[in-house]
Each structure stands twice: as C-alpha cells, then as structure tokens.
C-alpha cells in the first residue's frame, strides 16, 4: 500500500506527490545481570509498560539512538551486545507506521525513570506487567524464547 497525497510545491506551485515512509525507531532490551530486563512505564499515550526506546534523530545511527534513548528513559549507561531483530508490522504502533530495530544491551545499577518515563523497573519472564504496549510483549516473547 502506497500512502501518498498531492501537495503544492513551495517553489513553483505545481502539484507534486508526497510519499509517507515508515519512521525508524529503536527499542532496547536492557539486561541487568542476574536480575532481569528493564522496562519503563510510559508517561505519554499509549500508557503502559514498554521496553525503553524511541525515535531515531536525523543524522544519528541506530546504535547512537539506542544508547541515547536508554540513558534518557532509564538513566543507565548501556553496552550494546547485539542487534536482536527488526519489527515492521504497520499495526505495531497505533499512532503511525514505525519500524523498530531492537537491540540487546547490558547495564549495571538501578534504573531510574527519566524523560517521558513515569516509572522504571526490572522484570523477568515470570513477572512481566500485564499492561505492555505496542508489540513489546511479542518482542519479549521472542527474546525469552531465543527466537532470533
């Protein structure tokens, strides 16, 4: 499905097609040694628990975005272990078509909510929160089952 609309060229006034493309994001599964993985409770809609992550800024690599978003939302300095998988279902985020590249990272210490996170916690497979947003439950299932 191509999503395009006609707009006016700001220079010549002619009709031109504007194409909308999916937006790149990153999510980070942060492992805290022998304790579990970090999740944040979102302060913005959609509300609920999520893996830390966010939008990639223009001029920023995916890895740089992952490190920045992890720091902003959890106050943790992370070490990226590897790229996990990319999730691209157009329905994964009800706000718009986002494509997320997920990283596995490690960190030490205690996460502290920051940026748009209201709360941060450490969870394992057996005590995940019920209200997980986006497709993050699927991502975590894939992670715990070592699918990728």
Image (cartoon, grey):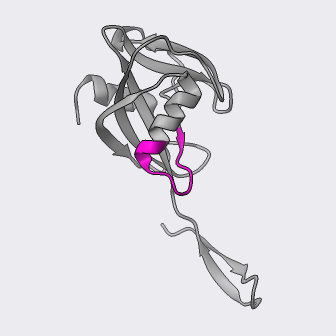
Residue 97 shows in the view: yes
Residue 115, position as x, y percentages in the image: 65, 29
Image position of 41 with respect to 94: above or below: above
Task: Please give left or right for residue 128 compared with residue 33 in the image.
Answer: right
Marker count (numbered):
0
Residue 134 shows in the view: no
Residue 123, position as x, y percentages in the image: 42, 12
Residue 127, position as x, y percentages in the image: 41, 8
Q: Locate the C terminus and report the quarter of the image it occupies.
A: top left
Q: Is residue 61 magenta?
A: yes
Q: Residue at x 62, y 45 (%)?
A: 95
Q: Residue at x 47, y 28 (%)?
A: 51
Return the residue nearer the eye: 76 or 141.
Answer: 76
- Which quadrant of the figure has residue 29? top left
Return the residue nearer the eye: 1 or 126.
Answer: 126
Q: Is residue 124 magenta?
A: no
Task: Please give left or right for residue 45 compared with residue 89 in the image.
Answer: right
- Which quadrant of the figure has residue 144? top left
Magenta-highlighted residues: 54-64
Q: Residue at x 43, y 47 (%)?
A: 62
Residue 66, position as x, y percentages in the image: 45, 38
Image position of 84 with respect to 145: above or below: below
């Amino acid at each position: 499905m191509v999503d395009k609309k006609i707009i006016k060229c700001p220079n010549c006034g002619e009709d031109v097609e504007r194409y909308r493309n999916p937006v790149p994001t990153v999510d980070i599964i942060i492992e805290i040694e022998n304790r579990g993985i970090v999740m944040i409770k979102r302060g913005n809609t959609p509300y609920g628990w999520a893996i830390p992550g966010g939008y990639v800024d223009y001029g920023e690599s995916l890895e740089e975005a992952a490190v920045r978003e992890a720091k902003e939302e959890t106050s943790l300095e992370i070490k990226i272990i590897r790229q996990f998988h990319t999730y691209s279902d157009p329905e994964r985020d009800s706000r718009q078509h986002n494509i997320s590249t997920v990283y596995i990272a490690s960190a030490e210490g205690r996460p502290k909510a920051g940026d748009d996170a209201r709360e941060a916690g450490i969870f394992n497979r057996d005590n995940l929160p019920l209200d997980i947003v986006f497709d993050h439950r699927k991502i975590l299932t894939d992670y715990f089952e070592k699918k990728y």
